[in-house]
Amino acid sequence: MASLTEISIVSRKIIRYGIYAIILIVIARYAFIAGVSIYKKLFPAPPPEPTVAFGKLPSIPFPEKEAKKGLNFTLETPDGKLPAFPDQLEVYFMPPIASDIKVVDAAREKAQKLEFDSAGKPIVESIQNVYIFPKRNVPSTLTMNIITGVFSISYDINANPSVLNGIVPEPKTMITDVRSYFSSVASQEGSDDINKGIATYELLRVDAGKFVKVDALSDADLIKVNLFRENWGSKKDIVNVTPEMPEANIWAIVAPNRTYIAAEYHYFPIDKGKLGTYPIKGADEAWEDLKSGKSFIANLGSSGKDDIKIRRVYLAYYDSGAYTEFYQPVFVFEGDGGFYGYVPAVKSEFYGAEKEKK
């Protein structure tokens, strides 16, 4: 029969070895997890094949602009190289514009929210669906397409130049105000885009009837606020660009007393749940497309030179400001003096017949 001393010794050994076993199990577990993590980093799983959910896509509806010939491009990014990009990207469906018998009433309600008289009327009988709404005792008009919801605001400064008196508010304050102004008439999706997207601003002075950019708030008569959509893509990290960069599709020029001197609202919703992934070009191919003229030049910039130095290259979604069936990615080439050039990002073989006709 074992003595109490022997039992005590055996018990202590069991406890000690049990603790050792637990420590070894914990160490082995963390070593296994670390090993799997390192393996995945060294040998990542290939991404799923592109879904190409919509079949062949229609060509991107770039506006008709007279192309300037003889442009020469030089790549001068910080490292002198083209960035690396993913080999596929999302394309989103944009639902068609719905119309019903209540569109006129809806337009009148929007006009009221924008502080215009709801008693609007067709601008001219020959132009369908476009209404004009006045503002009582103020030289300002709202012009709206009652089907698409696109609208513009114009104010006659010559009729009341005193509107320029005063000090332009701080840009941060005006960005908040302009977002609130446009959100009042936006759909839920539009409100999200307006409030979560990038906002930029310009300070302006009225000089001989023209708007001239200035640098100091003290020199400004007006402020222009641009509101871009929120970022898209699976990681919400891809910005959007417009046909008139750096101008957004939603913008307003505002006087010191918060009077809207001019504004544009071009917004069409995107179906976040209806998307497909498509193979995209390599950066080298996109660069060659730019140099060979297979591109859209949104802004030639202010340099006035034919030799364009490209400083930034990145992916973005092209927001046309008009209804189009799909929200598609482009390569953006930014250069000196405000140059912007776009190349469709999806590989050419995934575009339809209409692209081939051009």
Image (cartoon, rainbow, N blue to C red):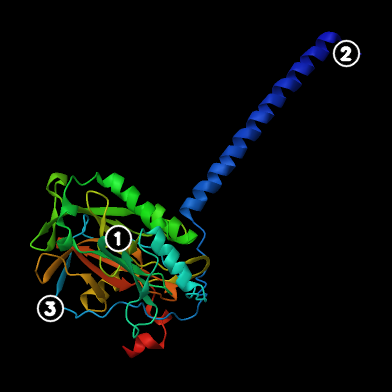
Residue 98 numbered tag: none
Q: Compared with residue 102, is residue 312 higher up or lower down, i.e. above or below?
A: above
Mark 1, Cα crowd under 10 Å, few <14 / some 14-19 / many 20+, is many
Residue extending farthest to the front is 137
Chain-order first, disc 2 or disc 3? 2
Q: Which amino acid does label 1 sit on?
A: Trp
Where is the N terminus found, in terms of image quarters?
A: top right
Residue 270 shown left or right of residue 219 in the figure: right
Q: Which of 98 and 340 is in front in this view?
A: 98
Residue 130 seen from this side: yes
Q: What residue type is labelled 3?
A: Gly
Q: Residue at x 40, y 53 (%)?
A: 195
Residue under pointer 1: 251
Q: Where is residue 221 in the image (x, y as percent from the top left)?
A: 16, 52
Q: Compared with residue 79, is residue 105 higher up or lower down, i.e. above or below?
A: below
Q: Give the image quarter of residue 24.
A: top right
Front: mark 1 or 3: 1
Residue under pointer 2: 2
Where is the C terminus found, in terms of image quarters?
A: bottom left
Q: Where is residue 172 in the image (x, y as percent from the top left)?
A: 29, 45
Q: Which residue is drawn at 7% across and 62% down?
A: 208
Residue 70 numbered tag: 3
Chain-order first, disc 1 or disc 3? 3
Q: Which amino acid does label 2 sit on?
A: Ala
Residue 61 shown left or right of residue 253 in the figure: right
Q: Where is residue 254 in the image (x, y as percent from the top left)?
A: 25, 54
Q: Which of 165 and 332 is in front in this view?
A: 165
Q: Compared with residue 121, is residue 117 higher up or lower down, i.e. above or below?
A: above
Q: Which of 95 and 291 is in front in this view?
A: 95
Q: Give the image quarter of residue 285.
A: bottom left
**Label 3 SS:** loop
Q: Distance between the residues labelled 2 and 3?
A: 101 Å
